[in-house]
Amino acid sequence: MSAHILAITTSPRRHGNSESALDMVLEEVGDRFTKEKVVLSDLSVAPCKGCGACEKLGRCIQEDDFQGLSEKILAADVLIFASPVYSMSVCSQAKALIDRCQVFWSRKYVLHTFEEPKGKKVGLFIATAGQTRENIFEHTVPVARFLFDVSGIKPKHTMLLLLNGLDKKTDFVNSQVSVTRTKETAAVLAAAIEEL
């Protein structure tokens, strides 16, 4: 059975640097796998209310597009998550989705009802930043790692593609270094998927 890739672009700015990098990864891995790309800004995902209901019920009580997307996240063999860096972390749309994934955390660590995947799952986090300062991604990566952990993706099966110095909307496509790194990452990802 072919592995299924779920790719989520979270930036409110369509076809910018993080989404362009994600699209290149999807193109480079080829057609050997099924793929679905989700544009988060097209969905309605409200912020977490911090009500704690998921710690008792094992589900989020808010009714919006999170329910359907959360099922896709758990069902995917490969999760690619792309976000720009805003104010030193993922963009607010990405953070709202990740915060809602607290329900997975509740199932896994409070209720102990989380069903671990039968096989290996793979995760790739793509982040782009306009700044070039050292450690620009240090507050971004842990947030993405939380998403992968509560989605059943082990740390050793996660990859990072962190691209800085990309500020204007077309900087990615004009940066040979970023394009080369993205193609190299896509090759590593494709090899990892082949082993699923």
Image (cartoon, helix red, strand yellow):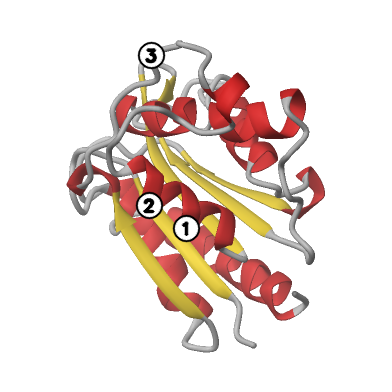
Q: What's the residue type where badge 1 is placed? A: Lys
Mark 2 secondary-structure assignment:
helix
- Residue 147 position within the rendered picture, expressed as x and y whole percent measured from the top left: 58, 37
Which of the two labelled residues, at mark 3 and mark 1, occupies the earlier sequence position?
3
Q: Quick one: quadrant of the C terminus?
A: bottom right
Circle 2 is placed at which residue position?
68
Mark 3 secondary-structure assignment:
loop
- Residue 65 position within the rendered picture, expressed as x and y whole percent measured from the top left: 29, 44
Please report the residue visible at 57 percent of the width from the left and 54 percent of the height from the top. Answer: 74
Q: Quick one: quadrant of the N terminus?
A: bottom right
Q: What's the residue type where badge 2 is placed? A: Gly
Give the left or right position of residue 42, taking residue 178 as reference.
left
Q: CA distance from mark 3 to mark 2?
A: 19 Å
Image height check: is 25 above or below 109?
below
Image height check: is 108 above or below 169?
above
Q: Are marks 3 and 2 in contact (CB under 8 Å)?
A: no
Front-most of residues 32 and 62: 62
Q: What's the residue type where badge 3 is placed? A: Lys
Circle 3 is placed at which residue position?
49
Q: CA distance from mark 3 to mark 1?
A: 22 Å
Please report the residue visible at 78 percent of the width from the left and 66 percent of the height from the top. Answer: 119
Front-most of residues 178 and 96: 96
Front-most of residues 78 and 179: 78
Give the left or right position of residue 133, taking residue 63 as reference.
right
Which of the two labelled residues, at mark 3 and mark 2, occupies the earlier sequence position?
3
Which label belongs to residue 72? Answer: 1
